[in-house]
Structures are given as structure tokens and as C-alpha cells.
Amino acid sequence: MTTPQHGDDFLHEMRRRSAAEGGVFWVEDDLLALFDPAAARAVSGANWRHLVMHDRFVDMVRRRPSAEMRWTRIRGAWLAQLHRLTTAEGNARALARMRQTADARLGTDVDLVMLAQDLAVRALLPVALTGLTARERAYVVEDLDQKLSRLIALRPRRGPRQRAHFVAVQIRAGLVVRRVLRRRASGRRPRELDLADPVVDLLPELGMDRALDVVTAVLTAIAGPPGAAAAGVLYELARQPAWAARLAAELGAVDEAAFCASPVRTAPVTHRFVMEALRMWSPPLLLMRRARRRFDLGEVTLREGQGYLLSPHMIHRDARHWDRPDVFDPDRFLPGAPHGPRDRNCYVPFGWAPKNCVGADLGTVHLMLLCYLMATRYRLAVPGIATVTMAFRFAPVPQHFRGTLTRA
Ligand code: HEM
């Protein structure tokens, strides 16, 4: 997933042009903005159909063909594993991990963006890759943290020393993944219920380099968007006291075990709140893709090799598709609400088939678990919340968003 870096001015300009030019326009000579919901869906669908992984490095060197690996096969293996993972027990374990992470910050002034990232990543890492030693885990977490700070930083430091350090940390984390896969394959480590595990069965066809790419794709996917979405949820909880009270009433009345078994059914108001937070502040803001074939889009032609930009955020904030798009109102997701999505193409926080997010359900549930903790266990005080604004980095990031968690 490519997430270009940009600033507030760029985003505002994209929004202005999208409104004026109907959602499809050239940003640069070779880069087309596809912020029209139907066009985004159609191009994504056709562009990634029959996607296969690149050849193995060793085969490229030896100039021989690699075993073909369709991307849908990898996705199918992830989705099957996620189905096994997303259970009442899995949710209860994630809740316990979030509780432990938040308890460690009780009573001190904290950066809530970083807290949100920590809560998300610590709850999700065991879903992606588990059974690590403390040292291996530290190496992997350091790599995830450094990638995240690059995405969030206002001005990332990019000198030669920083670059060398970045690469060294990345390689060390990659070696951990390779070792884990090798040992699971040879029986020296037990198989685990995580998203890395299906890759062990595919190792003979994938080869180690491509296997590492697959596991890295999951690790990268859990390191950015889930934490950014969690920051959006904390931001709205802090600045919408009336909604925070509605959530507290709903979540205070549910039984924890029943909530973990079926969050969406037992807490529909919380579900709507999370959906609306994802509409308002969906990460990543922009996805850059390359056309793998030619597309004729009415007056515009996108040629093979040219780039295009997709953006859930642009679609979610477009007044052609949403009534009062800048107003936070979870009730727009009530069935039949007049200010709800115009059609199914207009609500796309998890992207577009066939490359849409495999963790959509789990990501939503984890955001609901976060709401549960905030409503039942903690009190969040954010001095000056009315002055906290969103900056546009790889995702919307609340600026100077600091506060204190205490026990409720
Ligand atoms: C609220 C949290 C999350 C958000 C907002 C989010 C958002 C996204 C988006 C926008 C994409 C790109 C889709 C496209 O290219 O059309 C994506 C891809 C992906 N996400 Fe998520 N995601 C979240 C949570 C998760 C979780 C929890 C997991 C794993 C457990 C996950 C795994 C992935 C993977 C593996 C991909 C790449 C899929 C592919 O290339 O086929 N995501 N996500």
C-alpha cells in the first residue's frame, strides 16, 4: 500500500479541485485523481483482477520462471485465518491487551495520538505474528514504530545516518520474520493462529523472499491505519460529550462477555459512532496506484503505467454524495436516514475490491473495544479540546492532542 506524504494545503487544494472538476482530474501530467466513487470502484476492480506476485529473486537471477502465486490465494488464506481469530475469546484477549497498555499510562499527561497507536498495535501484533521471544518482539515493534513515526512526523529526518539506521532496523525485523517462518516450517517452533502462519504452508511455492513480503504487508497494514483510526475515535469521544454520554449509557449496560461475543449486535450506537469516526477521519488519506492497463473514462484516458490517486476521505467529504459531510453525526448510519450514504460506493473506509482491507471487520471491532474501555473503565480529560485541529499527514492526525486518563 503506497501512502504519499502531503500537507494540509495539498489536501485542501485536492478538495477544491475535486468539487470543481467532478472528482476526476489530472494532479500532474502522469497522476490522475480518481475521487469519483463509481470510477474508483471500476478502476480498482479491473486494475487488480488476476494480480499475481512478482517472481522470486533467486529465479530472476537464474532467469527461470517462478511458481505463479495469485494474490487472491494469499488473501483467501488471510481471510480464513481471520475468521478463526475473530471470536469472543480473541476479542476478550484484545480488550485485555488494550487495558494493560492504557493502565500503564494512568494519571500522566500523554500524547493521545501515540497512545492510540500503541493501543492499536499492541492489540493487533499477536494477530499478525505471535509466539515471538521478548527480543524478537522488540525488534519487530521497533521497525513498526519507526515506520509509523516517518508517516506521522511533520518533517521526517532523512539524512544518510537516519536512512542507514532505518534500513538496519528493517533488516533486523525481516530476519526475525524469516527465522520464525523457517522454524515453524521445520517443526522447531509450534504453528500459531496468526496471519503469518498460512504463509508457512505456501513457503515451497512462495520462496522465502516473497513469503517475507507477504508477512511484511500485514505488519505494515497494522502499523498505520488502525492506530490513526483509533486516534480519530479518541478525538471524537473527547469533542462530542453528548455522544460520549450515549456510548457510556449503552456500553455501561452491556455484559462484557456478551459484548465481546457480538459487539455490533449488543452495541449498535457504538457501532454507528465508529462508522462515523471512520467516515470523517479515514486513514490513509491518499492511496497511490499504477495503472496496469489502459482505462477509458469518458473524457479522460488513463494509460498503462500512469499513476492514479484514490481517497476514501475525499469521497466521504464530498457534498455531492453526503448531506452536510463535515458534520459528525453517527445517526446518518441509521437505516433509511436521509443524510446517509447515497449508495454503497460512497462509504469506503476500507478501500476497494479486490485489494480492499482484509481486516475491516476486526479493525471495526477493535475500535468498538476501545470505545468500551473509554466508556466503562477510564475518564479522558483533554484540556483545550476545542482548539485541537486535524493535520493531514498520511492520515488525519490531531495536533497537540494531549490529555490524561484516570480510572472512572
Ligand atoms: C480501522 C482500521 C483499519 C483501516 C481504516 C484500514 C484501512 C485499509 C485500507 C484503506 C486499505 C487499502 C485498500 C485498497 O487498496 O483499496 C487496507 C489494506 C489492507 N489492510 Fe487494512 N485497515 C484497518 C485495519 C486492518 C487490520 C486490523 C488488518 C489486519 C489484521 C488489516 C490488514 C490489511 C491488509 C493485509 C491490507 C492489504 C490488502 C491487499 O493488498 O490485498 N487492516 N486497509
Image (spheres, rainbow, N blue to C red):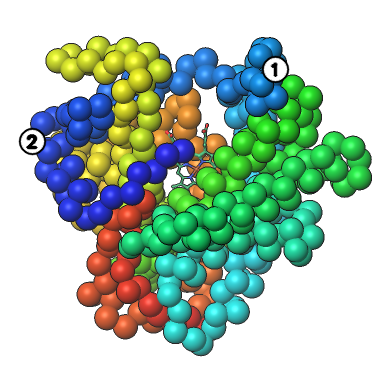
Does residue 405 show up? yes
Marks 2 and 1 sit apart, C-alpha to C-alpha, by: 52 Å
Structural crowding at the residue carrying mark 2, measured as other residues with C-alpha within 10 Å and reported as few (<14), some (14–19) or many (≥20): few
Q: Quadrant of residue 307?
A: top left
Label ID, residue 20: 2
Label ID, residue 311: none
Q: Is residue 96 above or below residue 298?
A: below
Mark 2 or mark 1, which has the lower sequence index?
2
Residue 209 image position (x, y, % from top left): 68, 33
Give the SS element for disc 1. Answer: loop
Residue at point 65%, 56% (across, down): 140
Q: Residue furthest bottom?
A: 107
Residue at point 32%, 74% (across, down): 400
Residue 168 image position (x, y, % from top left): 61, 54
Q: Which residue is mark 1?
A: 62
Q: Amino acid at mark 2?
A: Ala
308 vs 23, left or right, is right
Give the SS element for disc 2. Answer: helix
Residue 341 image position (x, y, % from top left): 27, 38
Q: Is residue 292 above or below residue 27?
A: above
